[in-house]
Image (cartoon, grey):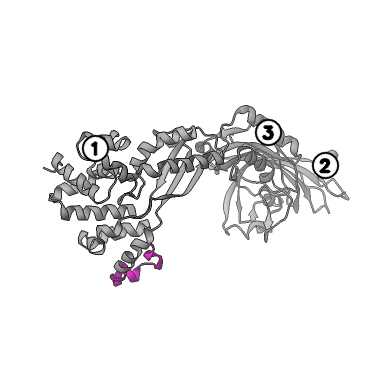
Amino acid sequence: MNMVTTEEERKIFHFLKSRGCCLRCCFRFIGYRTSECYYKPSEFAAQLSYADIKDDASMEETTCIACLGVLQDKEQKNVITKIAEKVKEKDYDCMTFTCALTVPVSVKLREHILYAYMSKEIDIHKSILSTLKTKLQNVKDIWKSFIIPQLEQATGKHADLSTPSPFLIEIFLMYADDEMIFKELINEHKGGNNKKQKKRKCNDNKFSRKNVDTLLIEMTDEQLMRHFTISQIIPKTFVHVDDVLCSHSSIFIGGRYNKLSRKLSQTPWLINGEKKVETSVQDLLCNPIAEMVKAESIKFLSSGREDVDVRNIYGGRPFAIELLNPRMTNITNELLMCLTSSINQSTKQVQITSNLKVLSRFDLKKLKEGENIKTKFYRALCVCRDVSGSLPPLEHLNELENVKIIQRTPLRVLHRRPLSPRTRIIYKMRARWAKPHELKELLSTAAESTDAFFVLDVKTQAGTYVKEFVHGDFGRTKPSLCDFLNNEVDIVALDVTGINLKWP
């Protein structure tokens, strides 16, 4: 019932062509999916006896009333040249690409206006017209079908059509008179709808894609034709390339690091825009990697973090770097090994302790998942402050296992963390009196008596505040080491000695 006959197609084709549509738009309005009609529209039209080839050349000199030249050959060479120049300038090494096109806002509105006049001026049943509207080929899809092969040749890259390439080329085509032609219509229509207008924001009167879509829902064909004649929407110029943007999806590189300094923050420490410390773990690790891959910016990710005065030794802390919009993405193991060596030679404050590895987004979940079941190992140098009597025995600490403690948010982080108690588990402890050489390495000043110092190795649930477990934080952590030893205990130095996570 609703099939379009050849004769009806011919009527529609000649109507559109006479109103200023290019051949490709004539075919897409009819709903043709044959690639030949878009690759060689003149020859295809001649085969169907739809068009006289003699005047096709002059048609190409006139801007299409529907697509504004997006699908016309006249500007394609210039468009392809600008895209290729931008791709060459940005110098991405990815050999595939995905293309995204933004066309002028008014293209959709022009299509609706043409359909309105088609319904009025051609003797065609409404059901046929409804069928045609559903078969209308998207201008962007048609553009890609015959432009992408030319882009492949111009850029030396291959278009990935089955799965999106990580390298995206965005082309923005603009038409200079778009807003001037339609702004009056939008303002008039919005202004005449006072009740709805009160509910809209002031920027709803802007000529935007969203507002055009709203307009088309609210206006009838008769209203569109009342505002516009065909002659009013005849374009004077072709579209032009407003911008070409190139971007690559993030890549991730990860490994483990040791932090060997007690004067180094994990991330840049800024107060009122000024650095409190000269550099950070993030700077020392990420900057060389970001420079290598020519990344636009980075995000530093890690399995927890250590305080400025806390070292991380032995196995190292798992970390990953998200490299945003990298240009160099063909990363080999040899390159990563050279990068590791270069970073380790450049600083003594931080050392990479594992092989660097290119990661997937799935790998990153391991850094954050299982926070409640992950275990960590620490070594703390502690001191008993009350030495008026005999020193407390340490042996019974070694017998304690799976001790539940409740920690209220520590005073030192209360300014940036919510006030909430949380339960953590101390799985095991091993305590012994400190040896003289350990004190010499760890104490910054000479102590009058070294007998009260002891070393505590502890295995805890992730998220435990170990410093507060030692000194009690004015009773905010219960029980604490002070409670177990019945003595005032303080922490002198702390090292992270292990993080139980399979990584990378």
The part of the image, by quadrant, that contains residue 208 is bottom left
Instruction: Look at the image and say whether residue 202 sits in the magenta stretch.
Output: yes
Cα–Cα gap, marks 2 and 1: 88 Å
Residue 291 image offset from top left, x and y in percent: 64, 40
Q: Amino acid at mark 3?
A: Thr
Residue 12 image offset from top left, x and y in percent: 19, 46
Closer to the chain start, of discs 3 and 1, is: 1
Label 3, secondary structure: give it.
helix
Instruction: Look at the image and say whether residue 251 sits in the magenta stretch.
Output: no
Cα–Cα gap, marks 3 and 2: 28 Å
Q: Residue at x 80, y 54 (%)?
A: 386
Q: Inspect this view and state whether residue 358 appears.
A: yes
Task: Please give the residue where the numbered disc 1 appears in the rendered image.
Answer: 45
Extent of the magenta region: 190-206
Q: Nearer the viewer, residue 170 or 453?
A: 170
Rendered image: mark on residue 340: 3
Residue 462 image offset from top left, x and y in percent: 60, 44
Task: Please give the residue where the numbered disc 2 appears in the rendered image.
Answer: 441
Where, quadrant-wise, is the C terminus in this rendering? top right
Q: Nearer the viewer, residue 445 or 115?
A: 115
Circle 3 Cα neighbour tier, 10 Å, few/some/many (<14 / 14–19 / ≥20)? many
In the displayed structure, 268 sits above or below 368; it is: below
Q: Is residue 324 left or right of residue 337?
A: left
Closer to the chain start, of discs 3 and 2, is: 3
Q: Residue at x 51, y 38 (%)?
A: 361
Label 2, secondary structure: give it.
helix
Label 1, secondary structure: give it.
helix
